Image (tube, coloured by chain):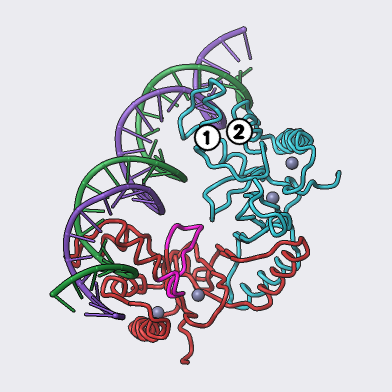
Chain colours: A red, B cyan, C purple, D green
DNA sequence: GCAAAATTTGAAACATTATAACATTTGCAG
DNA sequence: CTGCAAATGTTATAATGTTTCAAATTTTGC
């Protein structure tokens, strides 16, 4: 596995996209899941940047494609992609982002820059451990964790107003 | 401060409500904030149980009051209450819940039972510490944390289908 | 007290996000 | 081929949240 790109740093993003698509194909193959053209196209659109994309943004992009889709088309594709661990939904933004740990069995932690909008997904085992511990101290059986941190990325701390 | 009630256990919930309202009045006084009748009523409605309430649910309750409010009324009241740390928004549910640590300067962690719907708010310093650490290792300045754990509360693990 | 300013509330319209329901098409197994 | 299941199309609608401007209320400076 190659080093992961840092969202808010300039990088060859095409590499991110093609890596994500390659991974997705492999994962779906392994799971006997059908990465249909629509699903693949939605995944590609989600990956157009490291900023989360709303379902209706995806819808808009699809229609500039000439593909005239309705909301359920997009939501169904996004459901599929979530189910197979290829995208995450960012609850605090009602938006979706490509998973950077696809196939890795992880619980994501998202660092969301409120200035540039980029999101970095981390796997922080120590955080997960503490979360599990805190939950089990209450006798709670944790099944799903939503962990989203809003703030300022390193770049936007120094150079304000980055796009 | 009295012991905190456990949401999913039977308890004298009227005590929760009146404690919350008393605290709210004190906090607003201290902050020179105006806990107007609408705001207080919305807070009371939010506290009607330990299950998060949607904005439109609040709206509905208000109208059974005879108070015929429009959505902005509720959203404004909820904004005010959030601003002053009296309620939290649960992003994964699009719903609101009374803060059980009002005035305490905390970052809440929410244990959400998918069966009974009750939510327990915890303050887990060890989790906060690990979150801050993970963020700062990436040079990220964390400002706001959303931490919501869905799962099964102790009661619903043993007795399924609790209301 | 009183007028001006600021805050709060009312009201209507609108925007955004998500789902329900049912018809049609497509892929695949036998 | 044929029949079934999965996927997509289509229309309508539900649920959540915001913008805008007007009216009422409260606070402030005098
Ligand atoms: Zn990239
Ligand atoms: Zn991920
Ligand atoms: Zn209670
Ligand atoms: Zn709280």
Residue A1 horizontal side relative to residue A47, left or right? right
Q: Where is residue B154 shown, x and y percent of the image? A: 73, 58
Residue located 47% across and 92% down the image? A1
Residue located 52% across and 70% down the image? A153
Q: Report if residue A3 lies within the magenta region.
A: no
Q: Where is residue A103 shown, x and y percent of the image? A: 48, 82
Mark 2 crowdedness (10 Å alpha carbons): few <14, some 14-19, many ≥20? many
User: Label 2: which residue?
Assistant: B42
Of labels 2 and 1, earlier in sequence is: 2
Query: Against A39, is B107 above or below?
Result: above
Mark 1 crowdedness (10 Å alpha carbons): few <14, some 14-19, many ≥20? many
Q: Which residues are magenta?
A: A81-95
Callout 2 secondary element? helix
Asked if marks 2 and 1 fall on the same chain, the answer is: yes
Residue B74 badge: 1
Q: State the CA–CA distance, disc 2 to disc 1.
A: 7 Å
For the question of whether residue A62 can be seen, the reply is: no
Q: Report if residue A91 lies within the magenta region.
A: yes
Task: State the quadrant of the N terminus of chain B.
Answer: top right
Residue B125 horizontal side relative to residue D21, left or right? right
Task: Give the chain of mark 1.
Answer: B
In which image quadrant can residue C7 be found? top right
Query: Against A121, is B70 above or below?
Result: above
Q: Where is residue B103 shown, x and y percent of the image? A: 74, 46
Query: Against C2, is A25 above or below?
Result: below
For the residues bearing labels 2 and 1, Cβ distance under 8 angstroms: yes
């Amino acid at each position: 596995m190659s080093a992961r790109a840092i969202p808010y740093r300039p990088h060859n993003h095409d590499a991110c996209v093609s890596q994500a698509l390659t991974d997705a194909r492999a994962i779906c193959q392994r799971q006997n899941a059908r990465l249909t053209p629509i699903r693949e196209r939605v995944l590609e659109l989600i990956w157009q940047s490291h900023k989360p994309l709303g379902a209706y943004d995806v819808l808009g992009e699809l229609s500039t494609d000439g593909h005239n889709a309705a909301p359920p088309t997009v939501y169904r594709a996004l459901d599929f992609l979530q189910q197979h661990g290829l995208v995450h939904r960012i609850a605090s933004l009602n938006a979706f982002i490509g998973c950077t740990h696809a196939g890795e069995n992880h619980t994501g932690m998202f660092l969301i820059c409120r200035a540039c909008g980029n999101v970095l997904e981390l796997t922080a085992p120590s955080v997960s451990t503490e979360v599990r511990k805190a939950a089990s101290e209450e006798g709670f059986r944790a099944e799903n964790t939503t962990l989203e941190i809003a703030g300022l990325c390193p770049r936007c701390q120094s150079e304000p107003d980055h796009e």
